[in-house]
Image (cartoon, helix red, strand yellow):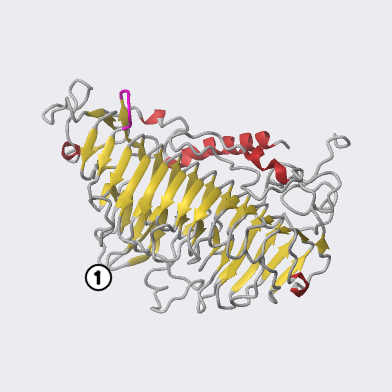
Amino acid sequence: MKLSKVITIVLLSFISIGVVYGVSANDSSSAKIGNQYYIDNFNGNDSNNGNSQEKAWKTMSRIEEEVFQPGDEILFKRGGVWTGSLNPKGSGSSKRSIIISAYGNGNRPIINGNGVENVIKLKNQQYWEISNLEITNFVNGEIPAEARRGIHIVNENYGGENLSESNISTITELKGFYIHDMYIHDVLGQDRKDTYGSSGIQFTVHIPKNKSINQRTTFNGIKIENNILKNVQRSGIILISDWSSRDLVEDIDNNKSIRPWTPILNVHIRGNKLYNMGGDGIVPHMTDGAIIEYNFINGYNTMSTGANAGMWVYNGDNALFQYNEVTGGKSTRDGMPWDFDHGSQGVTYQFNYSYNNEGGTLLLCADVVGKGVRNGIFRYNLSYNDSHQTFTVCKGDNVSNINIYNNIFYLGKNMNTNPSVEQGGKARVNIFNNIFVNNGRGKYEGKSSFNYSNNVYSGANIKGLNTINEPHKIIAEPMFKDKSHPDVLFPGTVLNKDILTRDVTDWSALNGFMLSENSPAINSGRFVTLDTDNYPNKHDIFGNLLYNGMPDVGIHEYIDNNTTP
């Protein structure tokens, strides 16, 4: 199957997903049944009715006087600038969202928070679409002692306003959020890593501090698409919940009976570009079944004093990270693009591309006390010149059934990255069908709790390779399609980096890592069970169906076009 056909199939599925969020696939045309309200900071007047461009309102405070209804639109004039925060009231419906967007010609409308806690905030509201605005939130570039955010959607005891005692037996849900085509930049806030932290786009399920009566609640239906975020301290895009206690994570306060794990559902984070994130990049924590795809990050962990990674999930299940590109991770306080982290299970990373990240490629890290991390899959990914060490393993013995197969880990001659280390706890990991190219100074060190099989090892440096106890070890040149192996960024970046464009992902940039017809990696892999790991479309990163004969090693399943119909 050609990659273009695969992408077409995936895109068709995206259109059907649009129904979940209460919006249509083409910018919520079904929502245009309500009233339109126009805001013009130059010619508007708050004494107007706001229902036409000629009778526009002027200020955001006028917006907050209204309670908006399903299908209403709040439209800011392009080229206008507003200062402060926006906290509109009301909720849409499953068929008609409330829209915040732009009208007219010219640059995006700008809302400058100028140091407020949240530039746009919705609390216990649902079915909203926010798009086509520019948001910033800082004061003289300082990093303050309090949190600041761009967009903050909050669920706090939704539906439990009249409770006389806590209700954890039933779950309420806020639904239908679509945030797209926003430009959010210079949001500079406190370096704090919890539900009260700083961010560009944040969804939070709060249990209020010092409140004993609470309603168990969550979100169901979030789509975050085609946004650009730049210079954010601390997290770029984050979803997080206080309803988080379960056996998979350390629970020192015995909160499982007080705030049981209640995942955020139907999350789709797609096509976003993030530049210079002070902390984490994209982190859909406490979710179940989130899809994170076609995103690009250049720069993360650039300002934080804590540990941060590019894309990962804490205490969440069944997240799928695919077709993402991550570079520019800073420090070895994590600093890697991908992470199997505390309390996660069933997480899959596939068809991703990482390069030039200071913290290496992949973290495997679980609480020592909790039941850990399990059932993770890392397949058909390409790591190019990621630094420090390819795998980092935290202490503890509760990382289990992690399958790392059919990846390429490439290191150029100027690299000092250790491809394998005996570090941390007894993480139980299978390392199958991967290609390790080491032209640098780093060495191999076999990890006793890792199960190695059918990997290809090549490059000028095979120091320490004898410490890896592996049947069917292959030491040979893999014979990539591009045989030159230049020690520069190879074979090129996948996404167009023009910050204000959204060019289509061009995965042909990775064609240099396809296998040539005489490669020893062809038919040299071992079979990996594909029917039991949520892998409905069994193909490699280039769209070739699996398998053509015995499994190949690396990210490419070779097909001889001269003999295969």
Percent position of residue 339, x then y? 54, 62
Examine the image and state in which quarter residue 533 appears: bottom right
Assess disc 1: are there few (<14), some (14-19) or many (≥20) residues with their C-alpha within 10 Å of its C-alpha. few
Out of 76 and 35, give the one closest to the viewer: 76
Say which residue label 1 marks.
210
**Range of the magenta residues?**
104-108
Percent position of residue 75, x then y? 28, 31
Residue type at mark 1: give it. Answer: Asn
Residue that protrudes farthest toward the top in the picture: 54
What residue do we see at 41% from left, 53% from top? 277
Residue that protrudes farthest toward the right in the picture: 563
367 in magenta: no
What is the chief secondary structure element of the magenta stretch?
loop
Q: Is residue 450 visible to the viewer in this orientation of the structure?
A: yes
If the image is split into quadrants, where does the N terminus sit?
top right
Percent position of residue 218, x then y? 39, 56
Q: Is residue 127 visible to the viewer in this orientation of the structure?
A: no
Q: Is residue 89 left or right of residue 192?
A: left
